[in-house]
Image (cartoon, rainbow, N blue to C red):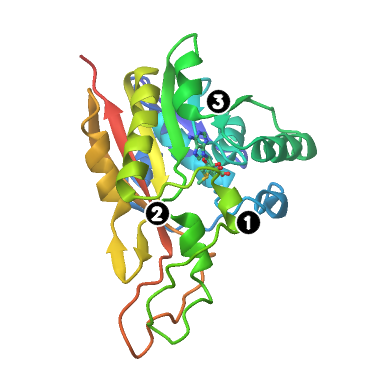
Amino acid sequence: MKTELFDESGTSRGFYSSLNRVNNLTGKEWVFWTRSVITKVYPPNLQHKLRSTHGGQKPPDLCADIIRIFTKEGQKILDPLMGVGGVLIGAARCGRSATGIELNKQWIDIYKEVCRREQIKEMETHCGDASRVVKTLTGTPFDMIFTDIPYWKMDKARRSKGVYKKVGEKARKDYKKTKLAAFNDEIYETKDDWLKKMAGIFKSASDLLCPGGYLATFVGDMYFDNEYHCLSAELANELIKIDGLVWKANIIWYDVSKKLHLYGYQYTYIPSMIHQNIIVFRKEEP
Ligand SMILES: C[S@@+](CC[C@H](N)C(=O)[O-])C[C@H]1O[C@@H](n2cnc3c(N)ncnc32)[C@H](O)[C@@H]1O
């Protein structure tokens, strides 16, 4: 059966089919959101300035758009690496519930303060290492895992800005742990350590995902030390080893807030990373 739906202004959203097992989108909306590049501009709303103290925060309305593609209203989402809660706030804004885990209490406190100021429903949060906390969660399985991973060498990559003496010159090797390291309490020294730790968290989280549910994560690729690192593909290659997970999509979010830079000018090509990948997997039904 198909039912025509209307938005708040009375404009038709298209027809919703009662056979839709995945989400509450109409056929027209479903087709729109199959696009693999998101160019929509998300305003700096919902205490953006306060959330920006984190540095890796994502627009809650972008998170809500992604959640609407992969879940139905009332369903449950797990974000094991929640930061200041882009996913949790997004879930609240589209009528889903969520559970968040974060290593650093200061980010959970900011999330709670944003909820208080914006009168947003506060979701369940846990402070601790996700690889341990996920195993303690009980109750019904989650309908979606949606997160945003801490970046490999984020502290070092940030520190390299302004450290180049000449354009194109190699980054210094003697980085000190700066306050930016607070962004990510754990410093993953090698890419293998980082991939192993992330894959472990996703493995435990996927045990809590219901069959047919989707697992999605933001992951930025990096240009670091004269080399491009396609971290999205490298992480995806680890996640497809997890039993039942099948890679379904790489959605590119074009982040209009990112500035272009001049790092390699007249010397070597260095890309300005103005996109993030959202890699999406489905836990196939047995
Ligand atoms: C990219 S940020 C998430 C940002 C989030 N999407 C937001 O909108 O604020 C990743 C977060 O993972 C946290 N983190 C890193 N390792 C963790 C671990 N082992 N367990 C739990 N949280 C961790 C970091 O402290 C960081 O806040």
Q: Which residue is drawn at 54% across and 64% down?
A: 257
Instruction: Give residue 272's position: percent from left, percent from top.
Output: 40, 71
> Mark 3 vs mark 2: which is more N-terminal?
3
> Mark 1 vs mark 3: which is more N-terminal?
3
Mark pair 3, 2: CA separation: 23 Å
Q: Name the residue under label 2.
A: 220
Task: Name which residue type carries label 1.
Answer: Lys
Mark count: 3
Q: Name the residue under label 1.
A: 179
Give the vertical position of 63 relative to 95 (above or below): below
- Residue farthest right in this picture: 117
Label 3 element class: strand
Q: Which mark is residue 146?
A: none
Q: Quadrant of the C terminus?
A: top left
- Residue farthest front in this picture: 174
**For discs 1 and 3, the disc positioned in front in the rendered view:** 1
Decide: marks 1, 2 in contact (CB < 8 A)?
Answer: no
Query: Which quadrant of the structure image shows residue 141?
Result: top left
Residue 228 shown left or right of residue 274 in the figure: left
Instruction: Give residue 41's position: percent from left, percent from top.
Output: 53, 58
Q: Mark 3 points at which residue?
A: 98
Residue 137 shown left or right of residue 227 in the figure: right
Give the vertical position of 282 relative to 136 (above or below): below
Task: Name which residue type carries label 2.
Answer: Gly
Q: In which quarter of the image is the N terminus?
A: top left
> Mark 1 vs mark 2: which is more N-terminal?
1
Q: Residue at x 69, y 27 (%)?
A: 121
Dot 3: few (<14), some (14–19), or many (≥20) neighbours within 10 Å?
many
Task: Name which residue type carries label 3.
Answer: Ala
